[in-house]
Amino acid sequence: KIEGISAKLNALSFKCGETAKLSVALLPESLKTVTMIARIGVKLNRVELPEFDANISYNGSFELPLPLALNQPGAYEVTVTDVVSGISNTLAFTVK
């Protein structure tokens, strides 16, 4: 049974043009051999950025680079949702 999704960013604040790294793991760790699908969504100042939308097939965990635009500072949110269970985890970060 899926208990949750662990999601982490390599920092909470970035500069325009940098690349954020998203690390995701399915909980519990005993599910690491099960193939799952996660949906990724990113918002900037509460507005969806469709260029980041993705469905990722993975076994247990994955890392995803999030290249940030040179001209889009603001308050970001990245949401990872397990497609099967609907469990999600949202992280906030800023770009200056």
Image (cartoon, helix red, strand yellow):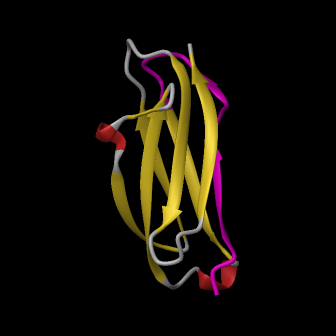
Is residue 29 on the magenta stretch? Answer: no
Task: Please name whichever residue, 33 or 36, is drawn nearer the observer in this view of the structure.
Answer: 36
Query: Could you tell me which residue is drawn at 67 percent across and 70 percent down?
Result: 4
Residue extending furthest toward the front: 46
**Image vertical order of residue 59 relative to residue 40, above or below:** below
Q: Which residues are magenta?
A: 1-19
Q: x, y (%) of residue 58?
A: 44, 71
Q: x, y (%) of residue 36?
A: 45, 76
Q: How many marks?
A: 0
Query: Could you tell me which residue is drawn at 42 percent across and 19 percent down?
Result: 17
Image side of residue 94 versus residue 37, left or right: right
Q: x, y (%) of residue 60?
A: 55, 74
Image side of residue 40 versus residue 61, left or right: left
Quarter holding the C terminus is top right
Query: Could you tell me which residue is drawn at 67 percent across and 85 percent down?
Result: 30
**Image vertical order of residue 67 relative to residue 63, above or below:** above
Q: x, y (%) of residue 3?
A: 69, 77
User: Residue 89: which quarter of the image?
Assistant: bottom right
**Image vertical order of residue 73 relative to residue 18, above or below:** above
**Image vertical order of residue 33 relative to residue 77, above or below:** below
Task: Please name whichever residue, 44 or 37, is drawn nearer the observer in this view of the structure.
Answer: 44
User: Residue 66: which quarter of the image?
Assistant: top left
Is residue 13 on the magenta stretch? Answer: yes
Query: Could you tell me which residue is drawn at 58 percent across and 79 percent down?
Result: 32
Quarter holding the N terminus is bottom right
Task: Please name whichever residue, 10 or 79, is drawn nearer the observer in this view of the structure.
Answer: 79
Residue extending furthest toward the left: 51
